[in-house]
Amino acid sequence: MPNSLVGARVLVAVPDTDEPPNSADVTDLADELGIEVITKRGAMAIEYLRELGPTVECVICVGDCASWVGDIADAAPSVPVVVYAADAPTAPVDGIVARDGGTGVLAACVTDEIRRGRERDRLDEANAKLNALNTYTRGITACETPEDVTDKVVSAVTDALAYDRCVLGLREGDEIVPYGNTLREEGSVRFRTDEGIAGLTLQSGETQIVGDYQSHSKRQRATDQVRSVLSVPVGDHGVLQVTADEHDAFDERDAEFLEIVGSHAREALSRLRRETDLRVERDRLHAFFEGLPAPTVYVEADETESIVLRDANAAYEGAFPGAPVGAPVDEAFPTAEERALVRESIRADGSVTKLIQRDTAATPDCELYVTLVPVQTAGLDAAGFVVYVTDVSLP
């Protein structure tokens, strides 16, 4: 039995007139195709389609009366109609099979209609899932904490993709720890990064589709409620899994959708990791900045290109009293050379130095070397430290 016809239901519609020749043969399709065939006559066929049309994937109309065929087609416009008759009716239908062609030709025509219909349904379902995912993936991308990522990922999987059994496991040292988890009976289960389907996914960086978990060589869970597993990597952060209690529950299309969620989770977690690293580095730099004996200020720029003096250390306050913290470049720096240095070099790949002359608290018209050191800071377009020294010679 072709997999594409599993569970198919076909209505054989027979007119109230005398029994058409070979109409009984049509019911043999049930055995030939392995489908469920329902036979209804006259008005009962039309009423059945009006009430239960969505449960039928194809109608075989045994008869060529145009008005009869037209009524059948109108009763459920979304269901394909195949006419099996001696003559072609004038009513619009999806397929016509001459009676002398036999049920073999009819079976092929019905099979094609069912397959095309199922493919359309799959595409419609895929589009609906993609549209639903768009909302959730935007939310995942905007998350500010790993906990937010976890919540949004679980919502995307359970709401948009309609999988009710999922887990997001994140790597902690040499373990994979469940965070987002709808598997309540296994909420605290941890695995080593080289154990189970999760470990295989993380180590290989490849999606795993497991149709028979109970006999899989990487089986780790003791539960008998898991028979299928779909596991996708979330970069080096962890794995995202969904499970089912029936065999062969997932296919490549399921994997593609789950990979979309996994990729957005990876991007969000990677961004949060980078931002954490940058904050730590910034804090270290600021601690160093405060302790510098040389006059130093911290400047930053946002996406509007506005550059502002955000902070000044004690040495700067001593050399240049009344530092205009919070002021833009044009107001914060008295010399054209300083302003140009900050504007032109805040996004440079490395430090840039200029020689200027500026009054200090101790020396009028003092010759100073000014160096801008660009730094990366989370959430900012650009930032840097401006350091003032009177001598750049090495000891």
Image (spheres, rainbow, N blue to C red):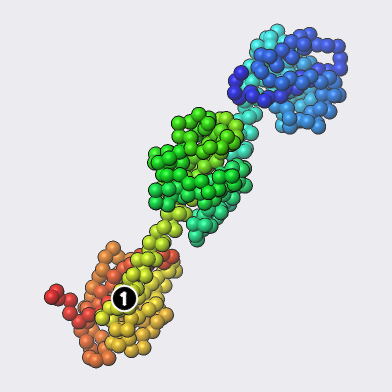
Relative height, residue 294 to residue 204 (above, below) = below
Taking the image as shown, residue 381 lies to the left or right of residue 47, namely left
Q: Nearer the viewer, residue 313 or 283?
A: 283
Q: Is residue 243 visible?
A: yes
Name the image quarter holding residue 245: top right
Picture coordinates of residue 105 (x, y %)? 65, 13
Give the labeled residue for mark 1. Answer: 289
356 left or right, relative to 1: left
**Image position, residue 384 (x, y; %):** 33, 71
Number of numbered discs on residues: 1
Residue found 78% across the figure and 8% down from its top:
21
Q: Is residue 381 visible?
A: no
Q: Which quadrant is the N terminus positioned in?
A: top right
Q: Residue furthest front?
A: 222
Figure quadrant of residue 389? bottom left
87 left or right, relative to 191: right
Whether residue 136 is situated above or below residue 349 in the rendered picture: above
Please state which of residues 1 and 216 is positioned toward the viewer in this rendering. Answer: 216
Q: Quarter of the image holding residue 27?
A: top right
Q: Position of residue 140 (x, y in %)?
A: 52, 54
Residue found at x 62% / y 27%: 116
Residue farthest toward the left in the current orientation of the protein? 395
| Left or right, residue 170 beside residue 394 | right
Task: Give the amino acid type for the residue marked by disc 1 in the picture.
Answer: Phe
Camera-side residue of 304 and 152:
152
Tell me residue 151's x, y (percent).
56, 54
Element at label 1: helix
The structure residue drawn at horizontal position 48% and vertical position 35%, both measured from the top left corner, is 219
Question: Residue at 53% of width from left, 31% of height from top?
Answer: 214
Q: Is residue 158 above or below residue 61?
A: below
Q: Nearer the viewer, residue 190 or 391?
A: 190
